[in-house]
Amino acid sequence: MADKIIIDTDPGQDDAFAILLALASPELDVLGITAVAGNVPLALTQKNARQICELAGRSDIPVYAGSAQPMAIQLVTAEHVHGATGLDGADLPDPIMPLQDQHAVEFIIETLLREEAGTVTLCPLGPLTNIGKALTKAPEIAARIKQIVLMGGGLFEGGNITPAAEFNIFVDPQAATVVFASGVPIVMMPLDVTHKVRTTRTRVERIRALGGDFGTVAAGWLDYFERFDEQKYGTDGGPLHDPNVIAYLLRPEIYGGRHCNVEIETESELTKGMTVVDWWGVSGRAANALFIRDVDDEAFFALLTERLGVLAAQRPAPQLRRLGA
């Protein structure tokens, strides 16, 4: 039986690859996709999520718009990384599939109360606003969540939006505080592991070689997305963050980490959004997350390319209006 998941996302080219990987994997039953403001504003993230579903030939997946602003602070976005649309690198047609009327937070709550307890995994790929609001509004859902596997935070790698903070946590640290204090089992994909999963030129060309519009779109996204991190880190290719959430569900054996206590800094001017990870167990605080640090990056890209190949063969992409960054 396929594992039931809800993907909460702010697409984002790397979010797109996470969604495509999930939709290409029969091991996973995507109950819905919930959009949140993050990489770009909500009006774009909900549109981008539907474009990605249509690219995969999965217009049957319901997409819900969620929070347009963080729980307690002003929104910070990342067009400097993802471009004005969030999916720069390939210009897809406007989506035909409808946006669902229900608010994402209500969908999350309703689904968790309806499905059998302990059977639904939440997969946040962006700021944790929708999840934090759902847990605040209906705290009884915490006991019903199988686990939360999220992309966010960092320790040894520091931050990527400030010296101390990773973007997803920085955008809504209050929501992150709610999530990490919820008691739900958490698996955390921080920069410490995602920085080991780089889109080298060889890996991008393998994806481009999938052919047709699908290969062109996927490689175009990577070409655009990696340019920022290549300049920043001086590497061949940039980190491909979000698909690690889905790859962990499919191949947990290629990852390694440690159960740690993780607390979120919400006030400091210097370290707001920092994930304070007790890697060495010095605080005496109970572990509340599995902090992933290691990955077999070759196995990750083999899995991703194989599954994208299934979509490329079975679900050709819609005709592009325009290509290029």
Image (tube, rainbow, N blue to C red):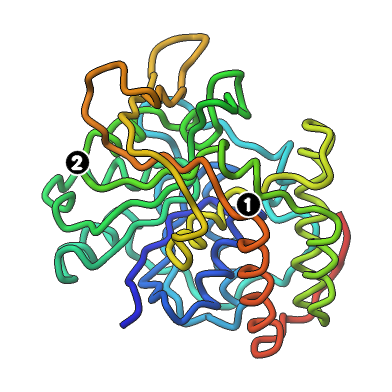
Say what amino acid the circle numbered 1 marks. Answer: Gly
The picture places residue 178, in percent across and down from the top left corner, at 27, 34
For marks 1 and 2, give the one nearer the viewer.
2
| Secondary structure beneath label 1 | loop
| Circle count | 2
Say which mark, if any, is on residue 183. Answer: 2
Between 155 and 95, the residue placed more toward the observer is 155
Q: CA distance from mark 1 to mark 2?
A: 29 Å
Query: Residue 39 lies in what quarter of the image?
Result: top right
Q: Label 1: how many residues lie within 10 Å, few (<14), some (14-19) or many (20+)?
A: many
Would residue 113 appear left or right of 170 to someone viewing this image? left
Above or below: residue 237 compared with residue 51: above
Say which mark, if any, is on residue 12. Answer: 1
Between 26 and 115, the residue placed more toward the observer is 26
Q: Is residue 55 visible?
A: no
The picture places residue 201, in percent across and down from the top left corner, at 86, 56
The picture places residue 116, in percent across and down from the top left corner, at 15, 70
Query: Residue 195 lies in what quarter of the image?
Result: top right
Above or below: residue 324 compared with residue 136: below
| Secondary structure beneath label 2 | loop
Say what amino acid the circle numbered 2 marks. Answer: Gly
What residue is rendered at 38% in x and 19% in y? Answer: 266
Say which mark, if any, is on residue 230. Answer: none
Placement of the N terminus among the 4 image quadrants: bottom left
What residue is rendered at 83% in x and 70% in y? Answer: 208
Q: Label 2: how many residues lie within 10 Å, few (<14), some (14-19) or many (20+)?
A: some
Between 72 and 232, the residue placed more toward the observer is 232
Would residue 277 appear left or right of 143 to someone viewing this image? right
Placement of the C terminus among the 4 image quadrants: bottom right
